Each structure stands twice: as C-alpha cells, then as structure tokens.
Image (cartoon, rainbow, N blue to C red):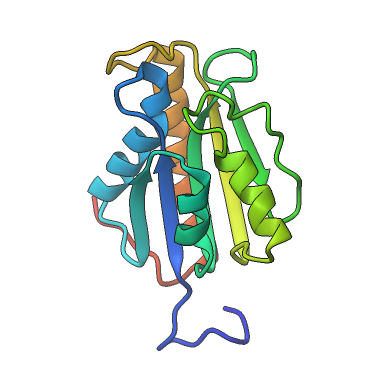
Amino acid sequence: MSSTQTKSNPPKLLVIGVGNEFRNDDSVGINIARRLRKLNISAIQIIEDTGDGAKLIEKWKDQDVVVVVDAASSGSEPGMIYRFDAVKQKMPTNFFNYSSHNFSVAEAVEMSRTLNQLPKRLVVYGIEGKDFAQGNSVTSPVKKAAEYVIDLIVEEFRTKHSSVHHSH
C-alpha cells in the first residue's frame, strides 16, 4: 500500500480486455475479460473495449493499476505471450497493429506517457494471434495462452493487493 492509499481509499484496479469478438483470435482480450469476470474477483473493475486509443486513455488515466490484454500480430509463433511494463518501457507499435484503429494500445500508451496520464502501474499483455479473419473461434495455441495469462493476472493482483479476493 502506498503512502497515499488507505484502507478507506483502496487502489483503483482495472483490467481492460481489448479486441473484436467477431475476428477470431482478435477476441482473446475480450474473452479473458469475460473469464475474469466469472471468477468474481473483488476490488477489480473488468471492462471490454474495442481498442480505440483515445477511449483507452480516458479509461485508465485515473486508475492506480491497469492490466490491458490484446491480441498481438508480430509474426511470432501463435500463442506467444508478451508482457510489457508500460510505465517503465516503451511499447513496440508493431505488435498491436491488427487493431482496426490507427491509434491503438501501443499508441495510447505512448500518448498517455507524453501527456503524463499513465496510471501508476500499467501492464500490457499481448498474445500472438494466428487467425484474424471474420468469425468467432479462437485457435488452440491462443486459447492455451489465454488460460495462462488469466492465471498471471489473478496472481499479479493477489500478491500485490491485499484487497483482491476471488471465489470459485
């Protein structure tokens, strides 16, 4: 707990699942948000978003800890998981270029950095996709990676924030 947070003023925790649920592997962020919501994790707000960068900035600018999950398309093996501590490192803009927006996750992070509107902690997970065609199925390697990322997110919040609990 930081010096500015008290028990009556717990940290604002947010998970944003980014994607398009009608473009196969691009839906992985949305699917993870929905799975996390079913875990009934207290103290964490979970939202879905299309990945419009300007809207992302508005959603995370007043939060303390934010985790963003989106499909990546860097040419690596499908299911590859990338984790960026976006407060400490620059976001590679070529990872999240499958968004239908020209101003997506990476650009939103860098714009927030420029405007001094990054949350205190911002972690971005990218899961390498394979199939971004129209449809609503996720390939097997992306499904497996999503399960692992869900575990990472739950563990990350549980170990660093005592206000976080979930029931099965």
Find residue 160 and report its horizontal and vertical position in percent. Answer: 54, 64
- Badge count: 0
Find residue 165 and report its horizontal and vertical position in percent. Answer: 34, 63
Find residue 78 and report its horizontal and vertical position in percent. Answer: 54, 14
Q: Name the residue rendered at 64%, 27% in the picture.
A: 95
Find residue 4 and report its horizontal and vertical position in percent. Answer: 59, 86
Instruction: Indicate left or right for 74 with 45 as reference.
Output: right
Instruction: Indicate left or right for 132 with 106 as reference.
Output: left
The foreground one among 164 and 114 is 114
The foreground one among 89 and 156 is 89
Instruction: Indicate left or right for 71 with 91 as reference.
Output: left
- Relative to 76, residue 92 above or below: below
Q: Quadrant of residue 22?
A: top left
The foreground one among 132 and 141 is 132
- Relative to 143, residue 109 above or below: below
- Relative to 128, residue 104 above or below: below
Q: Quadrant of residue 104?
A: top right
Q: Quadrant of residue 102?
A: top right
Q: Taking the image as drawn, is residue 159 in sight?
A: no
Q: Name the residue rendered at 52%, 19% in the picture.
A: 79
* Quadrant that contains the N terminus: bottom right
Q: Name the residue rendered at 44%, 85% in the picture.
A: 9
The foreground one among 39 and 120 is 120
Q: Residue furthest right?
A: 89
Q: Taking the image as drawn, is residue 6 in sight?
A: yes
Q: Name the residue rendered at 70%, 57% in the picture.
A: 113
